[in-house]
Image (spheres, coloured by chain):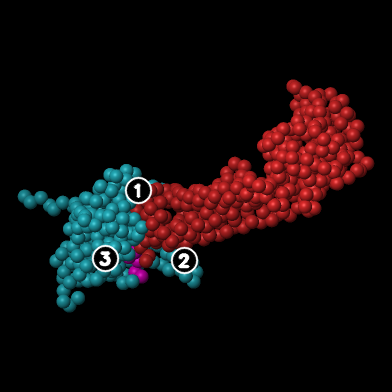
Chain colours: A cyan, B red
Amino acid sequence: MIAPPPQPQIAARVTDLDKSFGATDSYVHVLKGSTLNAYLGEMLLLIGPSGCGKTTLLSILCGTLKPDAGEVLVFDQPLHTMKNTAITKFRAQNIGFVFQQFNLIPTLTITENVAVPLLINGWSTSKAEAAARAMLERVGLGDRHKVKPGKLSGGQQQRVAIARALVHNPRLLVCDEPTSALDKDTGMHIMELIREITTDANRAVIIVTHDPRVYRFADRISEMEDGRIIQETTGKADIKARYLSDHH
Amino acid sequence: MFRLALKMLFGDHGKYLMLISGLTFASLLMIQQAGVFCGLMSWTFASLENMRAPIWVTDAKLEQVNDNKPLRDTDVFRVRSVDGVAWSAALYQGNLQARQIDGTFKQIQLVGIDATTFAGAPTEMLEGNLEDLRLPNTVIIDDFGRDRLAEGLPPKPGDTKSRVHLGDVFELNDREARVVGICKSARSFMGTPYVFTTYDRALGYAPPQRKMMSFVIAAPLPGYDAATVARRITQDTGLRAVTEAEFKNSTIWWYVRNTGIPISFGTTVVLGVIVGMAIAGQTFYTFVLENLKHLGALKAMGTSNAKLCGMLMLQSFSVGAIGFGLGCLMTFFFALGTLKKQQPPFYLPWQVPLGVLVVIMGICLFAALLGIIKVARLEPAIVFRT
């Protein structure tokens, strides 16, 4: 008898999320009952048109924004009810960030930039910088560990940002449009790097993107429209059929 | 994290130098002007430094040491009769004109001291002997007068500049005054040299008045407190008796109340605070605004508000400390120059730099608070909205 395939373990679950901004004239209802799961060992892409609520959903999912209503469970922690100080500590220990504009501090060397998450977690400077150098080796920038971000190309800066996001070995990696500030080839290289070094059975990766070229890297794609998840596609074959065919 | 905070600040050379220069300038302005103010105020009670006595007795209405409201000669005996007084002596102080050998005049501050006890005599002789004051027509001048009273006269053989020597003679009110000593003294507010002679001879030099004695100086008996004895003298004689320290204070306050000096210096000091606050506040706030994206990223990555506030405080206070240090250094060089020339007056009690340090750190706290309010309100999700 063949054993059933193991059930993927849930890393994050958001249920019936509601979020709006502004009041009266400027009121915008961004999320309207969004529900989404992210699984360990999986790369989830969150796609959809501009203004559909992808970034807001990602912000809530990683605990940088509070929902108006709904539940957010990340590694079984209820972020929607936790106090800000507890969420801040949770983020420091469990979440890695890759930002669209890299957000590297220009006055620090790339080693110091990569060491930041470890320093936030209370590591000593020498240990943090040693770990940061090792991480820079992994992203192919070991020989440039003393330079400042301004001396690097966009692709290299995003590599530094990836190293910074992973240096403290987070269980959840969130990437906000990681290729949008890069040219086509560099963007693909960055996605290959993310795919290669973030793949881990104990880590979930959530990427918000507009860029159809990166769909092929996904294990699952959740499509959003007008504040709701309207469609989910799981598995390479279905993703290819739905998003990567010539017709599409 | 705190090391990185400093690197973030020092790496932004333009803003760093702007902050440092603003705070250096503010510190310099405040310390230097307060130092000149204190120096000027110390000149106001120079007579009390040059004629030392534990208790000063004056007319009941006299407020400060440079005023002159003469007492009766008998008052010295009335003071001496008060319980607890060890001794009392008459003192003359007045402005006279000294006529030099070439006929020019110079204003001087004539001091007449008791010839028997030399109570109120200069404490440090540079040349000559105090006792020679008992010789006929003799005076002791201060080191400032040595140059001042020789101004316009040709230098003597062997001298590089004109100076008064022992044995030189000038006239006070058409009477001969022969220099038998040079003493060290504190400089007077009006910049006139001190000329010491005996009390009786001073009354001969000075234009006659019905009452001539300027002050009675006194000392308490061993075991008696000067302040208590002073109160007793006031009670028994109806005269105003104060300790040396009290007389200094009342003299300073008279100048503070009756001249524009404190307002003038105070305005400059306040300007220093405003300039420092404006430059430091605005530059640091701009620095925070420009780094808001990075601070937001740090917040998203899990840096607590408290740590971010600590980082901003450290950045602000470190530029404050550097700016204050440089301001002190520049004031030090200014002070070196003034001490050589004795102009302008400069006196820096330790309370002044301490007070300025507190003000500078207050400015830094203000600058840091502007940034802290911004950062505390900053939503970490801002990093996703580029």
Q: Position of residue B224 (x, y in %)?
A: 76, 24
Relative placement, left or right, of B328 versus A200 is right
Total number of numbered discs in the rendering: 3
Image disc number at residue A153: 3
| Callout in the foreground (2, 3) | 3
Q: Nearer the viewer, residue B341 or B289?
A: B341
Residue B196 in the image: above or below residue A28:
above
- Residue at figure coordinates x 22%, y 50% from the top left: A134
Question: Is residue B169 among the parts visible in the rendering?
Answer: yes
- Percent position (x, y) of residue A126? 29, 44
Q: Chain of mark 1?
A: A
Foreground residue among B307 and B92: B92
| Lower sequence index among marks 1 and 2 | 2
- Taking B226 as reference, is A140 above or below it? below
Residue at 68% in and 35% down: B124
Q: Please state the extent of the stretch shown in magenta in the rendering.
A: A51-55
- Relative depth, front residue between B176 and B211: B176
Q: Position of residue A57 (x, y in %)?
A: 34, 62
- Residue at image point 41% right, 67% down: A29
Q: State the mark number for residue A22.
A: 2
Q: Amino acid at mark 3?
A: Ser
